[in-house]
Image: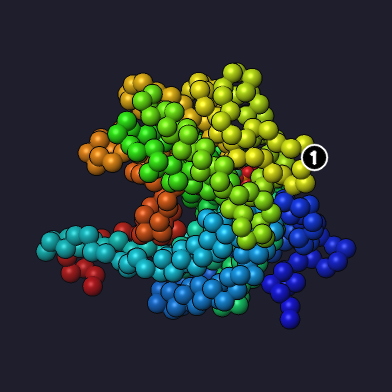
Amino acid sequence: MSTVLDEIQAPAGAGRVITDPATGDEVGRVPIATTADLDAAIAAARAAQPSWAQLGDARRVDLLNAAADALQEHAEELAVLLSREQGKPLNGPNARFEVGACEAWLRASTAPDVSPQVLVDDGQIRAEIHYRPLGVVGAIGPWNWPMMISIWQIAPNLRMGNTVVVKPSEFTPLSVLALVSVLNTVLPPDVLIAVPGGRDVGEAMAAHPGIDKIMFTGSIPTGKAIIRSSADTVKRVTMELGGNDAGIVLDDADPAAIAQDLFWGAFINTGQTCAALKRLYVPDSLYDAVCEELTKVAAATPMGVGLSEENLLGPVQNRKQYDIVASLVEQAKDSGARVLLGGDPDPQAVGNFYPTTLVADIDNDNPLVAQEQFGPALPIIRYTNLQQAIAWANGLEVGLGASVWSPSPQRAREVAMQLNAGTVWVNEHGAIDPRVPFGGAKGSGYGVEFGREGLLECAQAVSVKGPAGSFA
Ligand code: NAD
């Protein structure tokens, strides 16, 4: 029986080999798309868009739910491919979780009411707002959560009557091609097309006159490049960019009770998560206890090859990112910071395994704190004055997420209201929800995804207005 991978990969001898970051083994061969392939995909998606829009919302919702059923049927196969290509283990908040999230987000995108609304009807004036399709949307994604982030870009656009051309990350294209292939067992032809190209294809997509909007998730420099490339065509853009999320523990927290959630807030997907906890601020009075409890959890969490069922942490997806993590930890060590755990990668190791690393007694301006590490290393910064900790948390040019940890609802709210980020979590971190809008503040980007607000960003708002009785 042929697998999804058989269907999507390039024939033997063709394409580009993708290797497993845990073992170096070949996962498959990705076809190499050019800008000419992109042009053809955009033309096909443009041709398909009017009839997709004319199907109507109810029929599109049915098809999206049927596509979610198809994902469920192929869930294990998709999770295994994702684990091999991205490196993330099958278990824990990793590969099976990601495929499950794709299904959940797809279904959730069908729930909000996006029908036209009457804004004014006062006997003199009638005004309505309608949400019409934009046309063809280009989706450009990263390598950390390749399937889930693609679904965040695909699902709301299909719901709103747009067709979508997806350009996956060059590090994880097979996962996205497989995802698209399964969705396309249900969707009409050319409503959703994947183009597995490199940055040249991404650049061409951002500048392309046949693309009406770009949904981008990735790094800040690339986001800026896309904004520039898209300017001449006045494209709509949603920018989900990098972050460097702070968490502040208040002095009434119970270190043993919060350690597990703090750990996974930081180390979900082995730290390769945009809205992971990347700087932890802990009051002097709890500092040693939080360090001790976190170290216990971290030391007990197995890291290894993704396909082994016992592992919960995996390799860093690519060598470039591994080197960034390693260099930041080395700089922290050189500055005199205290390594509680890890920080000593095995140079002989097969695969990009960087050990789970906790670094204490580190200054707020150390590069491991000030820069996004995007890997399995967490700096823990001591504070004596809460206002100082809040100022440090808000002190960077990014603001994707932030969190506050306290058993006191009033104190937690008071601090939460002072944190400048797109999402502020209380007693959790990174716990995204398809019903709750998610987006960045400051340099972390603009536009939101999820919920009704996220759907409306995939539509052209059209106001219809006239004297009362002039239209029905
Ligand atoms: P990246 O910016 O290097 O690449 C992302 C995508 O952009 C890839 O598909 C790449 O081919 C494409 N690309 C590269 N140059 C381009 C150009 N000039 N024009 C158009 N497309 C281009 O990001 P990455 O390394 O894959 O992802 C890691 C970064 O993404 C981290 O900074 C992380 O914080 C961020 N991220 C943010 C979110 C979020 O929701 N805010 C989610 C995940 C990751």
Left or right side of 347 for 178: left
Task: Give the residue at the far top of this rendering.
Answer: 335
Could you say whether the residue bearing mark 1 is in a helix, strand or loop?
loop
Q: Find residue 336 and report its image quarter.
A: top right
Give the residue type that dot 1 points to: Gln
Q: Quadrant of the C terminus?
A: bottom left
Q: Position of residue 206 (x, y in %)?
A: 60, 49
Q: Which residue is mark 1?
A: 348
Q: Whole-percent x and y of residue 191?
A: 57, 70
Location of the N terminus by quadrant is bottom right
Q: Is mark 1 within 8 Å of ligand 1?
A: no
* Residue lying farthest to the bottom in this orientation: 1
Q: How many marks?
A: 1
State how the image is colored.
Answer: rainbow
Relative side of 90 to 40, left or right:
left
On the question of residue 250 being in view, the answer is: yes
Query: Which residue occupies the extreme right position in the image?
Result: 13
Ligand 1, what quadrant?
A: top right
Please report the residue visible at 46 percent of the width from the left and 66 percent of the height from the top. 104
Which of the pair 124/180 is nearer the observer? 180
Mark 1, Cα crowd under 10 Å, few <14 / some 14-19 / many 20+, is: few
Q: Position of residue 388 (x, y in %)?
A: 36, 22
Rendered view: 286 above or below 9: above
The front one of 196 and 9 is 9
Say if residue 246 shows up in the picture: no
Residue at position x 37%, y 59% in the image: 435
- At horizontal 74% and vertical 78% (from top left) the residue drawn is 2
Residue under the image location 69 percent in, 54 percent down? 305
Q: Give the percent coordinates (x, y) of residue 175.
A: 65, 61
Q: Residue furthest left?
A: 123
